[in-house]
Image (spheres, grey):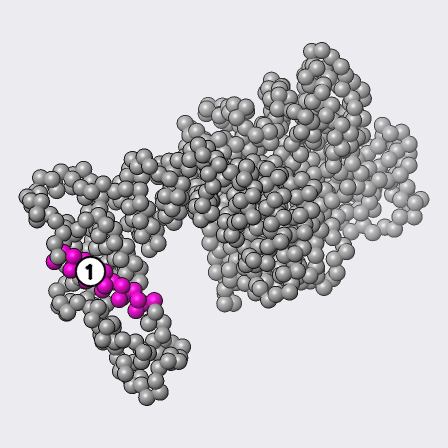
Amino acid sequence: MIRGISSNIDHGRYRRIINKSCFSTHTLADANVTPFNFEDIDKLVKKNRKRNEKDAQVTDNHRSIFYSLVKYSKAINYHKKNLENRSPNKDDGKIPKDMPENAETNLALPAVYDIYARGEFFCEKMAKNLGYMNKNMLIVIIKQSLSTYHNTRKKCWHSLSTKALRHCFISDEPLTCSDLVKICASLSKCYFKKLDEFKGKIDELIISQPEWTIHGASQILWSLSHLKLFSLPSFNYLNHTIVKCINLDSDKYIKYSDIHKIASANLMQVSQVGTIHPVLQSIVTHFANNTILLKCTGTKTMFAIVSILPYSAYNDELVIEILKILVRSLYQYSHVQAAQIIYKFAVIHSDLSNTARDLTLELLLSFRDLVLSSDITFIPSACSKLLYTYKRILGAHDEDFVNKCLSDLNANLHLLGPFSLFGSLLCLNSYFGEEAPEIGEKYRESVKHTKNNLLKFDDSGRLSKIVNGELVPLDNVKLWHYGLLSAIEKYDTYDHLFNFIGTLESTSLIHNVKSFALFLLNMCWDSSNLYNRNTMNSIFVIASKLLSLSENVEDNLLKQYWVLILYHLTTLDITTVFEHENIPRFPISSFDTDVILISLLTSGIRHDEDATLACLNELIQRYKDGKMSDAEPIVIKTILLLNYTYSNKTGGIVHKIINGNTRELFMETFYGSATVCQSNRSTEGYIHYLQKCLVKNLAPVPLEWTHIQIFFLQDYPRYMFKMIPLALVGNMFRIREVKCSIWDVSNWFLVKRGWNNLSNRLKELDVIDDSSIYEQLCEGYTNWNISEIKIANIATNKYVGPYLCQFVIMADDPSQNIIVFILADSPTENKHIYHKIRRDILNKFGYNFVELFCGQEVHTISTNSVQ
């Protein structure tokens, strides 16, 4: 009995599939060949062709060689897939169950293992006869040789597949659509590597075929995506062909398998290149017009449809129908698929109607029950998505569910990546920050332990993860991740900015521009990290290089990221340095409303009234039926406040349209609604629009939660840009204050300035002296001259205009009220334009204020949690 082989296998038949002539020591020459020009080889073949038609026909001898190769390759593949894994020589030491007890376990299997050594002879023999094979035979040879190479890793098989591929392309027989599908499927299935030689020819042949169907196009798209050939013109050509076929015959149903392939291929393109093709919208529209088809879809097709929802226009009827089906059939999906599906609905949650939100909540609770009743373990990226999903849909936390995610995170730290690291940190800060005192001490300790396990640095200061008890550097960390790290922890980003400069010309432009834009956004979340000379110089160099690389590039998404970059360069006062450069001026009419709002904020900070009016006019033209962006009301009120503060024309736009007390509008009731517009023919268009904005009830921007949403929406530009204007306004009005008591302020005034009115009043009110850091306080900017005032009361966490002020000393005379800011920044770091805007606004409206800076690092508090 042959060792490792079951007794019921026909060993004679198994050996007979090996051609007897293969037992030769003949070896193949070097398989490495240099790429060649197809036009030159065509000329060479035609010039040297001296065979007549009879010689060119496939003879029985050629067929014999062909079938021998096919049998031989199938034998190897069969052994690799079905027999090798049953060998008792495996490290596990297990003997196959069907092996007889009296088997000679020390025997070898020469006939089986010897077939690997015969590959070179077969490949060389076939290579010499490739010119006699027709295209169908060549396609089979490509498939079999690639499959055998994939299983054996013998170079001779890869060389044969390469030669067969060349013969396919120079054959007199034209390749059809089905031939190209078969060839590309073979290449992608076995992950063919040397594509540089052939991708141009593949691209040319695909585009030259006039008869692509949706089925054929979807199959070849699937193959091209696995080969990562997204940059080929044929990729978009096939997408356009599919869109055309759907539009021409909208009543014709698309095969479910084709939908899965089209969606998956294009989602891979979005991930790798950042390009969103309209074919995704066409698929959504197709199902929106034929919702009855959804009831027949399988799990794979439904998963694909849900995955493309964030990249297409929202259709409430379609989404509700999908949710109804998912609620009934969630048990049919794996836990990983179900988690991804619910995450997609968290992404589009801002668009959902009340009915859709109720169904989404029902879906989430069903998923929760499935998870908590099973022993499934999620990888870190899934855990971070689930933490965000639960917070986004439910609006609260669930201790059991969060505890499950914490357990899975700690169990799989070796699988940690940048997304799961920062996503989990942000969510845990949101769940268990200072704003969640109801969380038990047990859970606080659990979260603290998990956060300590997540955020690790090696001796070189690199982000790392724990693998087998050792620190291993984290891979694929982007520049904008370090910007986020600087907002979470005090972290110097200069080295990473310097390294980023060196990669600008060798990596994707759209990815670089996006990373730089999000880096600036995250850095401005904590602007104290920006004012380092090296950091500022690096930002200038990166902006200059990206600007030159972006010239003449027509990409709407690229332009949108540039609008965000220009906003931050304006806030950093860097745009003046670019006066000699060709600073892009983008036509705002091509942008979504939220991108126009970013441009509007830029013009407001630059005091450019003409640009402000242009943006307002565009917004007014888009305003219909009272529908507007979520960020629109607060951005419009912010712009009016900036215009009133800085206009040299007695209020500018505000003077023309506002009727009433501007102090009441902007400072006393900034968060709230107002009816203050005056009727005027010349400004009638503004009146209706602005009144709709001002009548909206505003609320302070939840800055931390807004940045969390931006992080999880960064792969979905349309939804991410909805949140960015809110983040910009939140950053502008944010005050990084420190935990400080009113007695610290009182003692500072008494010791440093000799002013005892406040301390006397505190004693009268029997306020306990709990000062601890007053000696660390130092004075910054102030517009108040020390004077005797009669203090009536002291207000804490009071809004003055858009700013949450830690202390407001209330006097009997309101004009003598004093605002006290205790800031975490040092005076040298307090140079950002946001601080200048705050001082200018308070000065404009006649407020007395004092800025005190803490001299050393203390625990900061959130100023956006008080509603």
Image vertical order of residue 379 relative to residue 228, above or below: below
Q: Residue at x 76, y 19 (%)?
A: 677
Q: Residue furthest top?
A: 681
**Region of the chain picked out in magenta, as a range:** 61-81
Image vertical order of residue 540 relative to residue 124, above or below: above
Q: Residue at x 33, y 72 (%)?
A: 83
Q: Residue at x 65, y 41 (%)?
A: 352
In this orientation, which residue lies closer to the viewer: 617 or 142?
Answer: 142
Q: Quarter of the image for the C terminus: give it.
A: top right
Q: Residue furthest right?
A: 764
Callout 1: SS? helix
Q: Quarter of the image for the N terminus: give it.
A: bottom left
Q: Residue at x 71, y 51 (%)?
A: 396
Residue matched to label 1: 67
Amino acid on which the number 1 mark rests in the picture: Tyr
767 left or right of 531 in image = right
Q: Main secondary structure of the magenta part?
A: helix
Q: Position of residue 766 (x, y in %)?
A: 92, 48
408 left or right of 839 in image = left
Q: Position of residue 540 (x, y in %)?
A: 49, 34
Image vertical order of residue 57 relative to residue 117, above or below: above
Count neighbours of disc 1 (C-alpha within 10 A) and say few if under 14, some if 14 to 19, many if 20 or more: some
The verdict on residue 345 being magenta is no
Q: Position of residue 124 (x, y in %)?
A: 15, 58
Q: Is residue 751 visible?
A: no
Residue 119 found in image quarter: bottom left
Question: So how many labels did they put on this image?
Answer: 1
